[in-house]
Image (spheres, rainbow, N blue to C red):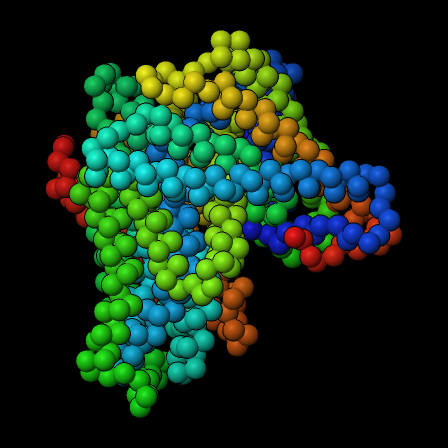
């Protein structure tokens, strides 16, 4: 695990071009979704602990609670992936990247977003939509008796995941392009709250 | 070689080359695989409709109940980080052993073992130990190479001691591979191998490693006393009974936590996720005991812990999702048949095949993370190896875990070394770290060789605990 320093977020005082404003808007959407999803980690701990207490102290099992854990886990991963990209949390092979100049890094990010991330996520979106559509058409529910009737909603998070990551990829590409165009682009501030 | 298989080779080479550019691994895996799939479609050797399997596969990955243990164990480790357990332990252990030549190094080893068993993530342990332990060792006149090597190797123990994240992921992959291997051989009531088996299997080799490290530290202290001097006693420090009480105080909480988590898994009463939830709640209690103002706790401790947990989990699973597309395309191009033929036709039969895979994993460790190797390499090679006669899935899993653990610390690219360089005091150079870690890497290789010749080290405990063949 070698997370890289986070890409810096915008400096609010500067007049900004339209693409950079779009990137800022995307960053806000992804960060808000990710921060909200992070609370699911607490839900995961709490519900799994409740299941343990119910099972070993009261001898009760609940398919419903067990599935809630699966849902919280899946939703957390799918909704936070784009935010993690924004925060620089996805591992890179940093043999060259760590030592590279800011321009070289921007070039890697620009090409990576356009040639690797976006095609991957667009194809996923294309194949996921009919998959989710089939699930919605029967309002697919859990196969277990007493399970949650929301499998279609959970599956819907797959195209949402693809869409969020694709958007974040666009934001990444915009910032990388701005950095490549040189010092004319406003210097990003270190604060990223 | 048919065109299809040429493309499978192109896929592997292209992934390795593009990874070097430094774009996030998960997205590189997915993007490059997709490009090769499109090329295969244009050349008429790949069926793009195979990609329709992608959404159900991803759904399977994120709803896999075994892997729910991952965020829970990550949460436990990150939360423990906030509880200052490490600092307290080290301070007390150093008092206990410090008066002996080489004693501080031994204290560090013990603390590392406790932290490894409680945390399961290398990064967190390395940072803590590098920040607290390394300056202490240097201040007391330890040889910088010995100090750096001890800290790096000890921190890496988190990768082999249950509940290491690597063991959970490997256990899940091995269980799928074992099922597939038995079905391929026509066994329709297959035996299972679980994450708990792998935890139990890793325990004896992990303690074996600690024993070897200990022997090494004692030998160094005996042969070169100047490299690991004793600490002059501190007149204000608690001694005798007071020291014993302090020791009990700092040891009891983490020990209880480790015993509860590991004990419940090994006793077979709880699943890894259930034990992890217990551990997570325990870690919250330990961190809460340490906290000051109640109101600030949520903002200053809980929210950052949740954010870290969420991002680390998301990072791991995104690699798994990227690797899903990679395996889909690799198999679609017949790559798995090719690997199968190559491995079964090796000279040396089973031993030759295992040795080749081990060597390949070791070499891949120079450029890839353990997670990437587990997700990309293991699903392809493990089902093939497990159909060969005389290979125990637990033994193979523990061998792989030990191998991957070694890859975390061998120069020049072991991630632990990078983490350590990031937090080490300025008088520690990269060369100190590289030279200092070499004896420990040799110990690792010796342990691998030992496990190769004495498979019982890994298989005895799971068989004794859970029975079975």
Q: Which residue is drawn at 30% across and 46% down?
A: B278
User: Nearest the camera: B23 or A136?
Assistant: A136
Percent of width and height locating residue A164: 63, 32
**Left or right of residue B393, residue B363 in this image:** right
- Numbered label tally: 0
* B70 to the left or right of A60: right
Front position in the image: A89 or B259: B259
In depth, the one of B223 and A94 nearer the eye is: A94
Residue B35: % across, % down? 63, 26
Where does the image place residue B449, in percent across and percent down from the top left?
Answer: 27, 51
Farthest bottom residue? B235
> Residue B49: in sight, yes or no?
no
For image coordinates 71% across by 38% down, the residue present is A26
Instruction: Please state the horizontal and vertical placement of residue B210, each as a whole percent of the image.
Output: 26, 61
Residue that appears at 21% across and 48% down: B263
Examine the rendered structure and indicate whether residue B264 appears above or below residue B347: below
Outermost residue on the top side: it is A138
Q: Is residue A63 above or below residue B144?
A: above
Which quadrant of the figure has residue A35? top right
Left or right of B40 in this view: A63: left
Q: Nearer the viewer, residue B317 or B203?
A: B317
What is the quadrant of residue B222 in the picture?
bottom left
Residue A75 appears in the figure? yes
Residue at point 43%, 25% (across, down): B60
């Amino acid at each position: 695990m070698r997370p890289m320093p986070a890409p810096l977020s915008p400096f609010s005082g500067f007049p900004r071009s339209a693409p950079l404003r779009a990137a800022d808007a995307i960053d806000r959407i992804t960060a808000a979704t990710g921060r909200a999803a992070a609370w699911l980690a607490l839900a995961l701990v709490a519900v799994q602990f409740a299941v343990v207490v119910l099972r070993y102290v009261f001898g009760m099992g609940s398919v419903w609670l067990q599935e809630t854990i699966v849902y919280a886990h899946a939703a957390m991963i799918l909704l936070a992936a784009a935010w993690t990209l924004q925060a620089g949390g996805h591992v890179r092979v940093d043999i060259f990247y760590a030592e590279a100049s800011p321009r070289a890094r921007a070039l890697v990010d620009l090409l990576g977003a356009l040639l690797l991330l976006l095609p991957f996520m667009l194809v996923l979106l294309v194949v996921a939509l009919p998959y989710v559509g089939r699930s919605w058409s029967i309002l697919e529910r859990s196969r277990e008796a007493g399970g949650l009737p929301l499998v279609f909603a959970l599956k819907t998070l797959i195209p949402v995941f693809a869409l969020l990551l694709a958007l974040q990829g666009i934001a990444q590409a915009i910032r990388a392009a701005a950095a490549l165009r040189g010092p004319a682009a406003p210097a990003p501030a270190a604060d990223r709250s | 070689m048919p065109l299809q298989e040429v493309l499978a080779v192109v896929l592997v080479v292209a992934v390795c080359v593009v990874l070097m550019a430094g774009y996030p691994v998960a997205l590189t895996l997915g993007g490059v695989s997709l490009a090769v799939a499109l090329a295969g479609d244009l050349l008429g050797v790949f069926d793009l409709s195979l990609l329709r399997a992608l959404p159900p596969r991803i759904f399977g990955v994120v709803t896999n109940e075994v892997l729910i243990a991952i965020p829970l164990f990550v949460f436990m480790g990150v939360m423990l980080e906030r509880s200052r357990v490490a600092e307290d332990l080290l301070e007390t252990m150093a008092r206990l052993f410090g008066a002996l030549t080489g004693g501080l190094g031994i204290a560090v080893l013990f603390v590392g073992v406790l932290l490894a068993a409680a945390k399961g993530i290398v990064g967190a342990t390395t940072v803590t130990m590098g920040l607290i332990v390394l300056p202490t060792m240097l201040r007391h006149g330890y040889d910088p190479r010995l100090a750096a090597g001890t800290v790096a190797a000890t921190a890496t123990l988190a990768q082999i001691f249950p509940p290491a994240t690597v063991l959970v992921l490997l256990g899940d992959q091995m269980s799928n591979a074992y099922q597939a291997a038995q079905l391929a051989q026509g066994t329709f009531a297959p035996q299972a191998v679980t994450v708990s088996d792998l935890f139990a299997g890793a325990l004896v080799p992990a303690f074996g490693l600690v024993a070897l490290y200990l022997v090494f530290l004692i030998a160094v202290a005996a042969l070169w006393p100047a490299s690991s001097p004793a600490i002059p006693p501190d007149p204000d420090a608690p001694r005798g009974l007071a020291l014993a009480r302090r020791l009990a105080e700092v040891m009891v909480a983490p020990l209880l936590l480790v015993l509860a988590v590991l004990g419940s898994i090994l006793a077979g009463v709880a699943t890894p996720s259930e034990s992890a939830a217990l551990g997570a709640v325990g870690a919250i209690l330990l961190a809460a005991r340490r906290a000051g103002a109640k109101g600030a706790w949520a903002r200053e401790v809980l929210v950052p812990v949740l954010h870290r947990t969420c991002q680390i989990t998301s990072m791991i699973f995104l690699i798994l999702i990227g690797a899903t597309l990679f395996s889909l395309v690799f198999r679609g191009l017949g790559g798995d048949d090719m690997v199968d033929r190559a491995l079964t036709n090796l000279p040396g039969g089973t031993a030759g095949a295992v040795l080749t895979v081990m060597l390949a994993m070791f070499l891949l460790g120079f450029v890839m993370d353990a997670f990437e190797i587990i997700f990309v390499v293991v699903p392809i090679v493990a089902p093939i190896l497990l159909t060969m006669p005389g290979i125990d899935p637990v033994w193979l899993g523990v061998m792989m875990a030990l191998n991957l653990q070694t890859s975390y610390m061998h120069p020049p690219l072991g991630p632990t070394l990078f983490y350590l360089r990031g937090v080490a005091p300025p008088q520690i150079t990269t060369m100190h770290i590289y030279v200092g870690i070499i004896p420990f890497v040799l110990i690792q290789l010796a342990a691998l060789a030992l496990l190769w010749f004495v498979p019982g080290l890994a298989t005895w405990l799971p068989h004794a605990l859970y029975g079975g063949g």
